[in-house]
């Protein structure tokens, strides 16, 4: 929600529609709503919605400014990571203190240039946590979660911070959210003081002194979530099947993922169609995982012929709410000129955004593009930016 001058609040929905107030035109209202934004995606969406529009030049100028700030943020972040890695190597007290200070300085500069840098907030929290400054660590982890409400590692360290501050009840809430937000590492194993546990099971909660409740709230911006903890943590068990039958969004997403993997590996169009139907239902609920899932299937020819218009539309819907996987997918399309104009600069910008939001694949692609830039004989050809 944004405010336009003396008018009533203006609401922009996921498709970019505007609730008009004060007799403004749709384009004017849209521009007034985003003109002071510091998010690149707001201006990218304006240019997509109003090509050749009245404020095109201003949007391009704003984007250029944000891109420049974003580049500086990435540079400072990479410098900070080198100091963080040096801390891990070890050394005398003076050396460790110097590395801490340099890491915090560069992380602060990264955030100053781009406040929505979730990874920078998270790494800053870890540095404070290593220094045993748990209140500052907690503040940084919370900022990372504000930017990316499904940042599972941030929830984990938020829990560690609360636990070290003797706030056990709050720590348990963080650990539950940690389990609930991680859909990609169900078999991850922790070894803590010689005790091996599955991090995404109630065993982890029990060891941390927590109890799995009958219901819990996941994230600050997600309104609809599971009523049963196991809906977020179990694999394909009777409990997860029950969650799926209840219409739990995470269980549906995981079922669609499983179906699509089987469909792709086996060339099974029926399973592919089942996955598409599930993701479409989630998309109808405005769930970004659904938008991205539908786009992914439409992006491959197994179930239906590729439909570039729908592919881009659904990826953009998910990207509009900062869903990192979808932002990375849009970057891929720009990189290879598939369904979108080939634009390596824009691909790099999108990969950088996705990496900031925690997408490790995007981080790898960002490094590949930079390697290509420095070495034209690199596998990624051509280097034409």
Image (tube, rainbow, N blue to C red):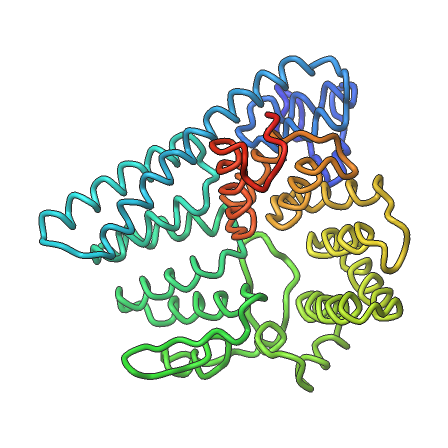
Look at the picture and state if 298 lies above or below 378. Answer: below
Q: Residue at x 87, y 65 (%)?
A: 273
Look at the picture and state if 139 lies above or below 72. Answer: below
Find the residue positioned furthest to the bottom.
238
- Left or right side of 236 for 358: left
- Left or right side of 331 for 192: left
Q: Residue at x 47, y 52 (%)?
A: 145
Find the residue positioned furthest to the front.
377
* Quadrant in the picture for residue 290: bottom right
Dividing the image into 4 quarters, which one contains the C terminus? top right
Q: How many marks?
A: 0
Q: Residue 24: image x %, image y %?
A: 76, 19
- Left or right side of 50 for 361: left
Q: Nearer the viewer, residue 39 or 302?
A: 302
Q: Residue 191: image x %, image y %?
A: 35, 77
Q: Residue 15: image x %, image y %?
A: 76, 38
Dividing the image into 4 quarters, which one contains the N terminus? top right
Q: Residue 254: image x %, image y %?
A: 68, 69
Q: Residue at x 67, y 80 (%)?
A: 236
Q: Nearer the viewer, residue 93 or 263?
A: 263
- Left or right side of 187 for 283: right
Q: Residue at x 41, y 71 (%)?
A: 172
Look at the picture and state if 311 lies above or below 289. Answer: above
């Amino acid at each position: 929600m944004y405010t336009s001058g003396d008018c009533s609040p203006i609401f922009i929905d996921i498709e970019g529609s505007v609730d008009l107030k004060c007799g403004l035109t749709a384009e004017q209202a849209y521009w007034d709503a985003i003109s002071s934004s510091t998010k690149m995606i707001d201006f990218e969406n304006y240019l997509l919605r109003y090509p050749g529009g009245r404020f095109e030049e201003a949007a391009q100028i704003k984007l250029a400014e944000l891109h420049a700030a974003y580049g500086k943020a990435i540079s400072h972040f990479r410098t900070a990571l080198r100091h963080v890695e040096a801390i891990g190597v070890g050394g005398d007290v003076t050396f460790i203190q110097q590395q801490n200070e340099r890491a915090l300085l560069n992380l602060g500069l990264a955030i100053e240039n781009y406040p929505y840098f979730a990874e920078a907030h998270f790494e800053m929290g870890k540095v404070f946590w290593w220094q045993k400054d748990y209140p500052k660590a907690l503040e940084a982890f919370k900022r990372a979660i504000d930017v990316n409400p499904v940042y599972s590692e941030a929830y984990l360290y938020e829990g560690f911070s609360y636990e070290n501050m003797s706030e056990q009840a709050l720590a348990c809430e963080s650990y539950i959210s940690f389990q609930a937000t991680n859909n990609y590492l169900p078999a991850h194993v922790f070894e803590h003081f010689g005790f091996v546990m599955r991090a995404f099971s109630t065993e982890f909660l029990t060891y941390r002194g927590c109890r799995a409740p009958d219901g819990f709230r996941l994230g600050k911006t997600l309104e609809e979530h599971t009523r049963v903890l196991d809906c977020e943590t179990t694999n394909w068990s009777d409990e997860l099947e029950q969650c799926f039958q209840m219409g739990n969004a995470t269980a549906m997403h995981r079922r669609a993922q499983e179906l699509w993997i089987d469909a792709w590996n086996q060339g099974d169009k029926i399973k592919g169609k089942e996955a598409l139907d599930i993701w479409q239902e989630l998309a109808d609920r405005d769930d970004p995982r659904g938008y991205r899932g539908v786009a992914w299937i439409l992006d491959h020819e197994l179930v239906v012929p590729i439909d570039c218009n729908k592919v881009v539309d659904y990826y953009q819907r998910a990207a509009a709410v900062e869903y990192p996987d979808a932002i990375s997918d849009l970057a891929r399309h720009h990189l290879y000129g598939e369904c979108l104009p080939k634009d390596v600069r824009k691909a790099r910008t999108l990969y950088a955004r996705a990496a900031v939001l925690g997408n490790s694949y995007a981080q790898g692609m960002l490094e590949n593009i930079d390697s290509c830039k420095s070495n034209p004989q690199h596998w990624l050809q051509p280097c034409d930016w």
